[in-house]
Amino acid sequence: MIAAPTDVRELAAGLWMLPGVVNWYLVADERGVLILDAGLPRDWDRLLDALVAIGRSPREVRGVLITHGHADHVGFAEQVRTTFGVPVLAPAGEDRLLRHPLAGMRSERPPVLYMRNASARAAANAMRRGGAFRPTRIRAWTPVADGETLGALPGAPVAVATPGHTPGHTAYLLPAQRAVVAGDALVTFDPYTGVAGPRLIARGATWDSGAAGASLDRLAELDADLVLTGHGDPFEGPVAAAARAARDAVHP
């Protein structure tokens, strides 16, 4: 194991998690380093520190791969693109959110209804401190299609369309690590309610619950035993088990 700051967690060979109010990930191999989701805008310094911690340099970064366009997942992506001169790759179908991470949001319930919950208030405050309410718009990105294998990138991720949380939400299978970066297609902690365990995130952050439920079936088909989510701890076990638990959980 590589010695690292306490906020860099090595999950498997060549795979690290940067935990927080929103999680993001690094995967590294002989091709370089890939950033999976881009956290909050003010996570930039954490990224630089994390690269040092895993024994890599900014020159080895090959791109940022985004699961969806919400402000807490695109945080420093534009800064990586312009500073390191590497592409941002994002799902086809997320154009509206990528252009307008806040104004482009759509959900089944008003998020303000959850603010009576202490967890929701704490998450909102952490997001504010991290710069999520003043996101940096991504000015150029490369669309990723469902089923596409990004073989030139570290980890050779495979795109798996999982709409529902957002219209174009996409998860990424990392075959070598037997892991799937699920983004918010399912979470293991719902910041809106403070409830832990695999579940769909609250309707206050869900574009279409029916589509989100169907995407759980898509995730369940994947051959992986480590599920990495945007919120909460990794789920260790078959993806199908996480998807089954998410389907059974209350979805307020």
Image (tube, rainbow, N blue to C red):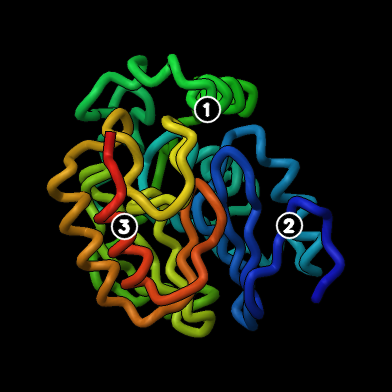
List x then y, in percent, for residue 65. Answer: 46, 58
Task: Judge left or right: residue 29 versus residue 241.
Answer: right
Q: Residues within 10 Å of mark 1 (few under 14, many from 20)?
A: some
| Vertical position of residue 240 compared to residue 103: above or below | below
Mark toward the start of the polypeptide (3 vs 1): 1
> Which residue is pictured at 42% across the width and 50% down the height?
187
Task: Judge left or right: residue 47 versus residue 200.
Answer: right
Q: Distance from label 3 to label 1 (Cα)? A: 26 Å
> Which residue is pictured at 23% across the width and 24% down the height?
109
Q: Is label 3 or label 2 in front?
A: 2
- Looking at numbered disc 2 in the image, what kind of residue is underneath it? Val
Q: Are marks 2 and 1 in contact (CB under 8 Å)?
A: no
Q: Distance from label 2 to label 1 (Cα)? A: 23 Å
Q: Secondary structure at mark 2?
A: loop
Q: Secondary structure at mark 1?
A: helix
> Which residue is pictured at 50% across the width and 46% down the height?
231
Image mark for residue 170: 3
> Which residue is pictured at 24% across the width and 49% down the height?
168
Q: Quadrant of residue 123?
A: top right
**Residue that extends furthest to the left in the rendered view of this protein:** 210
Q: Which residue is mark 2?
A: 8
Image mark for residue 119: 1
- Looking at numbered disc 3 in the image, what kind of residue is underneath it? Thr
Q: Are marks 3 and 2 in contact (CB under 8 Å)?
A: no
Task: Judge left or right: residue 34 versus residue 173.
Answer: right
List x then y, in percent, for residue 70. Answer: 39, 37
Mark toward the start of the polypeptide (3 vs 2): 2
List x then y, in percent, for residue 45. Answer: 75, 41
Q: Is label 3 or label 1 in front?
A: 1
Task: Judge left or right: residue 92 versus residue 58.
Answer: left
